[in-house]
Image: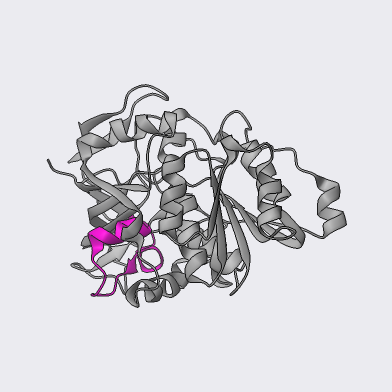
Amino acid sequence: MQAVVLEAFKEPLTVQEVDRPEPEPHGAVAEVLGCGVCRSDWHCWQGDWDWFGYRPDPPHVLGHEPTGRIVSVGSEVEHVEEGQEVAIPFNFACGTCDLCRNGRENICENHVGLGFMNEAPGAFAEEVHIPNADINAVPLPESIDAEAAAGCGCRFMTSFHAMAHRAPVGAGDDVVVHGCGGIGLSAVHIANALGANVIGVDLMDEKLEKARELGAVATVNASEVDDPAKEVRDLTDGGADVSADALGIAVTCQNAVNSLRKGGTHVQIGLTTSEESGMVPLPTDEFVAKEIDFKGSLGLQPSRYSEMLDMIETGKLDPTALVEKTIDIHGVPDELAAMSDYDTLGIPICTDFSN
């Protein structure tokens, strides 16, 4: 089958023929119907994230935002069946550790990152293997098109967890999102659906325009003001209730924290680059004096996908509104290369894997 293969970090990606996966006893194989092209794939290609284990040994198949149709199941799978259309979280869980048993399977003790670790070749491919399929394959309602549902992959579902669970955002909250790429725009859209007054902050006018289309009540172009955090504090009469850094660089994280009012909550969604290597200086005394909460957010528990899917079914959320364009598998390398200059808007989706 065809797949996008990382042969060497930072070197051009290629589409190659690789072996089709076979299901493990507890696993299943899905034909990939759609897979988002995400900046996290770019980070993996660049060789980032070795500081927390997301650095596979080349050659490795990339891709971590798939939906698919089950084509084969292992002998010990009980609930997943051939022909089912499923969403596939990138944060594979074991289903048996204490965290999984307590509803936190997104941070499973035996976590495996799809497309980011040797144990889980990715989904820029005709087929992908899903370990522990009864946990990690989430059946899609018939009303949700599987190809379109690829738009609710990593960026969208991570933002849902961040806004709905980790903050959590409530009606009337002032929420500021720093960085309006795919994950930031998802957060804008979701926070708006949850009843918040959302402010988007970015350097690019077209991304800020998209944020307004998705529900932002105000935007700040950080390249046009001296202090983006002060702009947010002025717009919100003292600071936001919730801030999110959706990019993962020092300046956006710091600006997001400095946008908060007393008693506010910061949610870190973006992961850092090799420049920060996971370490960002923050105003610790401000956390103390203002009793600010700092929370991380990783993926979404498969057991809580139904909350997001219900909101999509009823029209409160629309991940397709963030889909910039659809491409075939041969367009994936160029799409990732464009992310080196932040030259993408919204969420590109790969929907043709055999062209």
Residue 153 on image: x %, y %: 38, 56
Q: Residue at the left extreme?
A: 355
- Residue 59 x %, y %: 35, 30
* Residue 181: quarter of image: top left
- Display coloring: one colour
Query: Quarter holding the N terminus?
Result: top left
Percent coordinates x, y for residue 293 in the rendering = 74, 59
Q: Residue at x 65, y 43 (%)?
A: 228
x and y, in percent, of residue 82 in the image: 20, 67
Residue 134 drawn in magenta: yes
Q: Is residue 99 shown above or below 258?
A: below
User: From what the image shows, is residue 292 above or below residue 76?
Assistant: above
Please name whichever residue, 234 or 154, is drawn nearer the observer in this view of the structure: 234
Q: Residue at x 37, y 39 (%)?
A: 344
Task: Say whether residue 307 is visible.
Answer: yes
Residue occupying the point 23% across, 53% down: 32
Q: Is residue 11 magenta?
A: no
**Count of numbered circles in the view:** 0
23 left or right, relative to 341: left
Left or right of residue 199, residue 240 in this image: right
Q: Is 343 displayed left or right of 254 in the figure?
A: left
- Residue displayed at 59% across by 68% down: 169
Which quarter of the picture shows residue 14?
top left
Q: Can you see residue 108?
A: no
Q: Which residues are magenta?
A: 130-152
The quadrant of the image that shows the C terminus is top left
The image shows residue 302, relative to residue 129, as above or below, that is: below
